[in-house]
Image: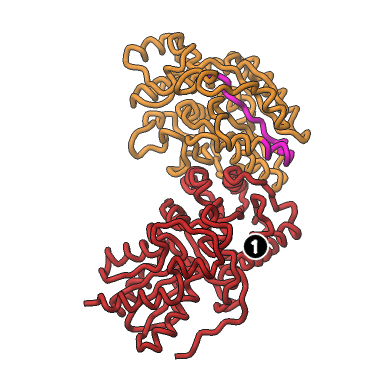
Chain colours: A red, B orange
Amino acid sequence: MEKFTFTEQQDTRSGFGAGLLELGHSNPQVVALCADLTGSLKMDAFEKAFPERFFQVGIAEANMIGLAAGFTIGGKIPFTGTFANFSTGRVYDQIRQSVAYSGKNVKICASHAGLTLGEDGATHQILEDIGMMKMLPHMTVINTCDFNQTKAATIAIAAHEGPVYLRFGRPKVPIFTPADQVFQIGKANMIKTGQQVSIFATGHLVWKAMKAAEILHEKGIDAEIINIHTIKPLDEAAVIASVRKTGCAVSAEEHQRHGGLGDSIAQVLARHFPAPQEYVAVDDQFGESGTPEELMVKYGLETADIVMAAEKVIARKH
Amino acid sequence: MRFESYLRSMKDIPELQRIASQVRRDILRQVHAVNSGHPGGSLGCTDFLTALYFRIMQHRPNHFTMDGKGEDLFFLSNGHISPLWYSILARAGYFPVAELNTFRKLNSRLQGHPATEEGLPGIRVASGSLGQGLSVALGAAQSKKLNNDPQLIYTLHGDGELQEGQIWEAAMYAAAKKVDNIIATIDFNGQQIDGPTENVLSLGNLEAKWQAFGWEVLRMQGNDMTSIVTTLENAKTYTGKGKPVVILMKTEMGAGVDFMMGTHKWHGVAPNDEQLKQALSQLEETIGDY
């Protein structure tokens, strides 16, 4: 097989910033709110271009979520920006009551998700956010894999009526999806077809899964790689069709094993096509300080871990 | 656009008092019917909400839209006084009065705490988990400014609710951002579930607190219809001047029913058959029970 290549490396949060700026130009109803992390979220370009539609709320995330819910009354499309930890766990009840239960058209945009936030440590490395958000009725949950996809997703969610959680990250990662892609919420991306194992990856783990497929190929294993950028609503048809063909699954995510993408995959398989599955995820632990690279190795979220999981799950097939 | 319902409903004080009497009956009958709900705070805030919906606000009960463009909006942050709000909304024409019969029952639009999920006209955000309404109202207020909509935002909060930190995040924000198209009202009844606010967690000097946060502070007797109408009209003159406005509204929990007043015991307890009869005997049926 041909090796996967990328054009350059860029952070997904910059994709969000670029998408938001473009939305500022194309959609006058879009407003942005930020809780004192404008630079980190790459919202400064929007702030500069559209100061009357940018709202600096200070270090007050609960108020920010409530404000966003209020902005929808009158037709605005609010995008909130802060770290994933402060976008979810800190404001869970505000999101639950004022946004999700109230059916508000709020876009909760969360950067620095997962271990790859790095040296700041476990206080900031949220690994439970996908679980919390996907449990909320009405909520759409998206975790994008590179700059281009994050930009496309940012633009796409503005056109989607309803609350959305958009998760992205801090480090520079390969750009391998097309710049001109149209982001379809809820539609899985087939990256490589294969016959022996289905690898469902999300976010930063998608590129690592692609690299794992190359290694597996050298070992004579033909892996299918699917990018699940939308965790909810999950593309169940894509999951079932793939596993029906390969007979086993690996899920890969920068998140706790409990409550993440893997559990969503497992639920679909249990209901429609029971099959062995292995998880590449954080195993019920908090993170710690370290470089993103060191942390991904220590917590088992590397290419090598995906390769091992694939071999293990293939061995479990009847 | 003309506010037909508004013009039609410029009620004088005696008429407002007659409506309030009927609303109090509605509250008691709703909570009695399902043996649950919160009569105390509902009765205490009845006069305020009656004046707001039947005299002060410019709104369109018969043409409810979520966006509420071009009309005044009200947000109830202390959602547990839902039987009051439901009665007011029904009596103002947002939905059929007979629907009050469904309060807190299965498959009803009248949930225990106000919600948008079932599509009840008049409600724009869910409330019940306390402390969130001011933030939402401020967002709606800033949305109005972006839309060049000159109408006002009104809110109601419990005093116990002020123990929630988010209220003060919102209070700080409103003054800093000069959100001056909002009139917030605090139901200052001094009671909460576990007892007098002073004993549970003292609010200290509330007037000084709001002033220090940069708000224009007014005081009002919340069970005196004349005081309410005068103060609310006065409050409007403070809007548009760069500062948010808050009214500390002194009320009596359980107001209108003698044995429910002066105690926190009727915060979340429904009257039994005998108590209902006794309570209703003190409140004239002015418009007709549902």
Q: Quadrant of residue A29?
A: bottom right
Q: Is residue B181 left or right of residue A311?
A: right
Percent position of residue B5, x then y: 60, 31
A248 or B68, which is in the foreground?
Answer: A248
Please report the residue visible at 53 percent of the width from the left and 52 percent of the height from the top. Answer: A123
- Locate the C terminus of chain B and report the quarter of the image it occupies: top left
Query: Up-down: is A223 above or below A67?
Result: below
Percent position of residue B233, x then y: 70, 23
- Locate the N terminus of chain B and report the quarter of the image it occupies: top right
Is residue A164 in view? no
Magenta range: B172-190
Please report the residue visible at 30 percent of the width from the left and 67 percent of the height from the top. Answer: A269
Please name the amino acid that badge 1 sits on: Leu
- Residue tagged 1: A20
Please report the residue visible at 59 percent of the width from the left and 46 percent of the height from the top. Answer: A61
Q: How many discs appear?
A: 1
Q: Is residue B171 left or right of residue B201?
A: right
Is residue B216 in view? yes
Q: Is B61 in the magenta?
A: no
Query: Up-down: is B74 above or below A57?
Result: above
Q: Is residue A20 left or right of residue A233?
A: right
A229 or A289, which is in the foreground?
Answer: A289
Q: Dot 1: few (<14), some (14–19), or many (≥20) neighbours within 10 Å?
A: many
- Secondary structure at badge 1 equals helix
Percent position of residue B133, x then y: 56, 36
Percent position of residue A67, x then y: 61, 44
Q: Is B181 in the magenta?
A: yes
Q: Chain of mark 1?
A: A
Query: Up-down: is A214 above or below B245?
Result: below
